[in-house]
């Protein structure tokens, strides 16, 4: 994973609550076995009409929104299915951070895993940011190191799990870190009750 | 020492190291074709192995056809995805319930029915409805693909300690009101975000009175309330269900396991971070009218007006939902016509669900113009239903009788509901496009779905017969 420090760029406002992962990346794109290439299908059912033609006015079809780095959305962003493809699609389109009043638990975890920055700010601040984001050229800075979001006169600090922050800043591989605890894992395994199920008998 | 909850007991005994976040040991890792390929390729890329293949079980469920599936999976990409899982399982020595295996089925159906799911375990799967397994008094939650890779490599997962929430369902569930109605009623109370950051323990007389399959229906939809996990304390109902299942402990080990399982329930003096009460006697059959699982009403009710909601965002979301669902406020729920009926999924695709539906259907015919489908949750459920003659009842009534899989629950396979058409579905999600682009989903219990198939519109099953 690449380290994440500062995300700076333009925004896209998506003023809806409870945006679920079925909207972010519909199921017909989940049969791929790769981790990349989902960006063009981001928000597909909102971005295309029934015949597959681009829906005018939706940000994915708006040249002025191309290159945006921060998505600003409503409460409970990323609820529903655990598909990490949702995070991959958002990143693949070009976003590096999502700002919302709250995120669904699994989506937040998946974002951390893939280096997409989920930033929780109070609802009023998100609304302010959304208004600023109406201007496709407005620039926002999300600084993970200082844990602040800056946009014009707006400056807001955000909370993030210190362990996660550290891992994101350094771009560390979680499996490598966990394997430093190999002795503890082995010790744990040695004392598990014998009745626990196994799929194959050794 | 202060009393501890079921959740805390399971959590504490699975901590390998750390506090918050803690590194938890995973007793069972369930795998399916859609959320695993990138995890396996990550392992391979880094030259890593699966640490405990014997604690890993894979099945094929999400994208497979439910007819003629032995011939060939027509969609080349789905076929490749299934083949990829086969190769990954073969290479890493993981047991796979392949399409020709009598144990194949939906991941959250096959785990319990084969006795893999047991009280006190930590269970994960790259699937948000892993909460289902909490019905046995296990801590079970969905994870993303990068975490799947982590669990494959280390058999552990880092977790922040969630908060606890008790949902107390007091009193007795009235006749004709299903476990599905109970969870839909709970979701209507706590909302789709009410459980965020929490693990729910369902408690109370009505919960104790549920069968194991009903408990799975309730725990299944915990994620629809935002909670990653839902759980129910193990009791004699749990033990009776488990005893004799292929992977349940046997003999002396069974006795030792029982002693242990009895000790993990919530202590009387334990406290929860939050407590919600729901009265079972006041629950009625529910029907969802909107595009999230919190947007439900009683079948005797009418489609609500957006003005009904105080919160501007809720109002907005209701207005959008009504537009998508093509419903007008004030319409009685029983006036809503139905084009499709889907009985199946990890919520309601078990044998007792099929029995409930069959009871309603027996001797009747599916309404002209309604396409009605039964998709058993697993091939074992299918076999059992055929043994009981349920397939005949369904076929005679005009239902299509299918092979096991997720099917129209998420419509990744050919079982897609066409745009603009309306489906009474026993699944768990009514999001826009979930069952097909433009498809309109109404979440209901199996009996309610079956009754809608016969009548062509919703009816109150309590008035049935
Ligand atoms: S039946 Fe539906 S909810 Fe359950 S695992 Fe399959 S797709 Fe997911």
Image (tube, rainbow, N blue to C red):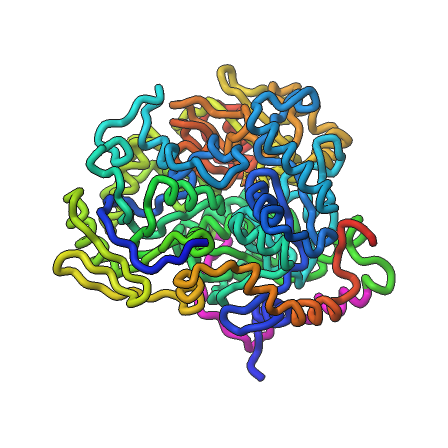
Camera-side residue: B253 or A29? A29
> Relative to B45, does residue B374 appear above or below in the rendering?
above
Q: Position of residue B167 (x, y in %)?
A: 49, 61
Q: Residue at x 71, y 55 (%)?
A: B52
Quadrant housing the C terminus of chain A? bottom right
Displayed quadrant of residue B388: top right
> Relative to A196, does residue B334 appear above or below in the rendering?
above
Displayed quadrant of residue B378: top right
Q: Position of residue A137 (x, y in %)?
A: 16, 44
User: Ligand 1 appears in which quadrant?
Assistant: top right
Q: Position of residue A159 (x, y in %)?
A: 33, 66
Camera-side residue: B217 or B121? B121
User: In the image, which residues are magenta?
Assistant: B255-281
On the rendered structure, is B322 left or right of B343? left
Q: Residue lying furthest left in this view? A: A153
> Relative to B415, does residue B312 appear above or below in the rendering?
below
Camera-side residue: B366 or A62? A62
Displayed quadrant of residue B206: bottom right
> Relative to B197, does residue B214 appear above or below in the rendering?
above
């Amino acid at each position: 994973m690449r380290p994440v420090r500062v995300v700076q760029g333009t925004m896209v406002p998506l003023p809806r609550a409870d945006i679920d992962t079925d909207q972010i990346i519909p199921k017909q794109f989940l049969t791929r076995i790769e981790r990349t290439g989902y960006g063009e299908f981001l928000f597909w059912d909102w971005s295309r009409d029934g015949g597959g033609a681009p829906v005018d006015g939706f940000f994915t079809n708006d040249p002025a929104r191309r290159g945006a780095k921060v998505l600003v959305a409503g409460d409970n962003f990323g609820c529903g299915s655990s598909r990490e493809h949702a995070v991959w699609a958002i990143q693949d389109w070009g976003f590096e951070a999502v700002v919302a009043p709250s995120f669904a638990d699994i989506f937040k975890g998946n974002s951390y895993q893939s280096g997409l920055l989920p930033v929780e700010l109070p609802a009023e601040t998100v609304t302010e940011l959304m208004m600023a984001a109406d201007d496709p050229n407005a620039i926002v800075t999300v600084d993970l190191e200082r844990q602040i979001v800056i946009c014009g006169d707006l400056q807001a600090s955000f909370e993030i799990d210190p362990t996660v922050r550290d891992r994101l800043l350094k771009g560390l591989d979680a499996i490598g870190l966990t394997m430093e605890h190999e002795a503890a894992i082995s010790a744990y395994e040695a004392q598990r009750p014998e009745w626990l199920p196994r799929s194959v008998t050794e | 020492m202060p009393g501890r909850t079921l959740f805390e007991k399971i959590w504490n005994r699975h901590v390998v190291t750390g506090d918050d976040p803690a590194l938890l040991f995973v007793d069972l890792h369930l795998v399916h074709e859609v959320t695993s390929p990138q995890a396996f390729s990550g392992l391979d890329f880094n030259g890593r192995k699966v640490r405990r293949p014997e604690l890993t079980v894979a099945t094929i469920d999400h994208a497979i056809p439910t007819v003629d599936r032995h011939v060939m999976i027509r969609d080349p990409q789905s076929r490749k995805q299934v083949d990829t899982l086969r190769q990954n399982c073969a290479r890493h020595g993981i047991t796979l319930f392949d399409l020709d295996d009598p144990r194949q089925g939906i991941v959250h159906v096959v785990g319990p029915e084969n006795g893999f799911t047991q009280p006190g375990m930590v269970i994960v799967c790259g699937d948000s409805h892993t909460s289902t397994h909490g019905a046995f008094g296990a801590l079970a939650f969905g994870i993303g693909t990068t975490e799947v890779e982590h669990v494959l490599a280390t058999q552990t997962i880092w977790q922040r300690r969630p908060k606890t929430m008790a949902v107390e369902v007091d009193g007795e569930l009235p006749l004709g009101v299903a476990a599905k109605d109970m969870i839909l009623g709970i979701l209507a109370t706590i909302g789709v975000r009410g459980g965020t950051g929490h693990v729910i323990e369902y408690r109370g007389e009505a919960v104790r009175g549920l069968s194991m399959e009903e408990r799975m229906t309730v725990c299944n939809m915990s994620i629809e309330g935002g909670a990653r996990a839902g759980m129910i304390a193990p009791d004699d109902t749990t033990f009776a269900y488990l005893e004799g299942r292929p992977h349940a402990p046997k003999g002396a080990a069974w006795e030792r396991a029982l002693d242990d399982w009895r000790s993990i329930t919530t202590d009387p003096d334990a406290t929860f971070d939050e407590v919600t009460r729901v009265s079972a006697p006041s629950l009625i059959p529910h029907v969802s009218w909107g595009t999230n699982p919190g947007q439900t009403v009683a079948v005797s009710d009418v489609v609500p007006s957006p003005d009904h909601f105080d919160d501007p965002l809720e109002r907005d979301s209701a207005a959008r939902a009504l537009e998508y669902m093509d419903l007008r406020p004030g319409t009685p729920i029983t006036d809503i016509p139905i084009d499709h009926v889907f009985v199946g999924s990890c919520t309601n695709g078990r044998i007792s669900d099929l029995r409930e539906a069959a009871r309603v259907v027996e001797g009747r015919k599916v309404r002209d113009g309604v396409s009605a489908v039964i998709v058993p949750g697993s091939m074992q459920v299918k076999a059992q239903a055929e043994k009981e003659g349920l397939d005949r009842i369904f076929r005679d009534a005009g239902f299509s009788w299918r092979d096991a899989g997720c099917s129209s629950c998420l419509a990744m396979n050919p079982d897609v509901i066409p745009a603009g058409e309306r489906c009474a579905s026993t699944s768990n999600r009514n999001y826009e496009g979930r069952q097909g682009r433009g498809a309109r989903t109404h979440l209901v219990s199996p009996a309610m779905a079956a009754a809608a198939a016969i009548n062509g519109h919703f009816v109150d099953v309590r008035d049935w017969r």
